[in-house]
Amino acid sequence: MMVGMAEAFALFFAVKREMPLDELAILSTLPILMGSVSQWLMPVIVPPHKLRSAKLFFYLVQIAGLTLLCVATQQENLFPWMTAALSLYWIGGLSAGPFWLEWISKEVPSKAFGSFLSKRNAFVSICTLIAYISAAAFLNNNTQARDFLIVFALGTIARFASFICQWMLSRATIDWSRKKNYGRPHKTPLPFKPILWMIVLTVLFKFAVSVSSPFFLPFMVKELKFGIIEYVSLTSIPFLGRFLFLAGWGRASDSIRPFLGVQISSLGIAFIPALWVWLPNFWLYAGLELLSGVLWGGFELCTILILQRFLQKNTLRMMGIHMSLMSAASVIGALTGSWLMKSQNSFQELFLISSGARIVIAIAMILIFLRIPSTKTKLKVYAQYLTTALSLRPSLANVGRMISARRRG
């Protein structure tokens, strides 16, 4: 709910207040860079036995940033207030991420971890979608500063409620030995080489993505002349895609298959900016965004599974390094995109440059993993993976089971 009400509309609010493009570029990158630095340092500084308290502390830092965001809506000089607010927000959120993942990986057995993450992320996606659409419906006819203040305040309250839940959950224990098919947590270690290649290539891919991704919002508002209804419709569809298909990606991620997921999803994501240039109408954009949600869900889930399932040691530190490198790559990519825009490139040219770079990196990823024996697989396995991951029928069946189980509860 916090993401759907606060994070999703922070930059939109800045665009509505007609913040200059150079300030907007800094606002969309500098806070993430600061969060990236904190994300890199914290797993090194914080001892392993402080995982629970560390994640709770950084949730409070994020709540402080959200509170400052509410204050920023009432200020005339918007830029410094929003920069401070989003810096605290991203420092708290990005730093808490590795601690939460390491903590939950110790609580959930390896056999259940992929299924847990896929179902948890599907549930989070639908909650985000509901909050996002609700906030957008409110802001459709109410775009004054006080209206954004109401939305941001609701997001802050939601984050504080989740902090209370996390605090309570940190003191709970679950006996997995009594669950069917689940015993003590275990890992299936791999040589470090394929994991290192995954880290390097996904960081490069994140850079290529971020060359264009910060500019989709101004492109939709300034070039396509989309209002808030069209904008929210398109940007909410990926959440729906994740909700419908994440259970399928979870089933497709057994054994060594997370490496397949990274390859397939990155190749699909590579073509998205180019298709934004060539597609002629809103409904085709909507279909593209649905596919985008499916692919990004697979990309994010599979990279997490690779680090958690196959890394032999220093999982927390490597996860922090990977996340911080991804964040830093997004900052550098956004600054590169801003430089290209200032060099008189159009939005369309920027999207084509980003798409070309993504395609090269995605193909390199496929070729490299095909040369590593521990990740090499036959072509038919790729087809089986796609059939499992992109099958709508079992995904809808999973949704039905989740709804019926909730009703029974």
Image: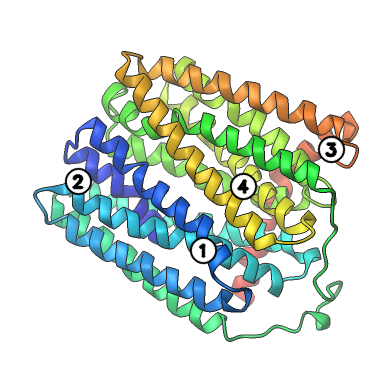
The earlier-in-sequence mark between 1 and 3 is 1
- Between disc 1 and disc 2, the foreground one is 1
Q: Earlier in the sequence, mark 2 or mark 3?
A: 2
Residue bearing mark 3: 384
Residues marked 1 and 4 touching at CB (< 8 Å): no
User: Looking at the image, which residue is at 59% across and 38% down?
Assistant: 203
Looking at the picture, does residue 363 appear above or below residue 109? above
- Estimate how packed mark 2 is, as few (under 14), some (14 to 19) or many (20 or more) residues with alpha carbons within 10 Å: some
Amino acid at circle 3: Gln
Q: Quadrant of the N terminus?
A: bottom left
Residue appearing at x 16%, y 48% in the figure:
78
State left or right for residue 300 relative to residue 1: right
Where residue 337 sits in the image (x, y, percent)?
40, 26
Residue 236 placement: quadrant: top left
Label 4 secondary element = helix
Image quarter of residue 122: bottom right
Q: Residue at x 51, y 78 (%)?
A: 53
Residue 79: assigned label: 2
Structural crowding at the residue carrying mark 1, measured as other residues with C-alpha within 10 Å and reported as few (<14), some (14–19) or many (≥20): some
Distance from disc 2 to disc 4, alpha carbons, whole Å, reads 31 Å
Chain-order first, disc 2 or disc 4? 2
Residue toward you, 255 or 370: 370
Which amino acid, mark 2? Phe
Graded by Cα atoms within 10 Å as few (under 14), some (14 to 19) or many (20 or more), the crowding at tag 4 reads few
Q: Which mark is residue 300?
A: 4
Could you give the CA–CA distance between mark 1 and mark 4, rounded to whole angstroms? 21 Å
Closer to the chain start, of discs 1 and 4, is: 1
Report which residue position mark 1 lands on.
42
Q: Position of residue 172 (x, y in %)?
A: 61, 85
Tag 1 secondary structure:
helix
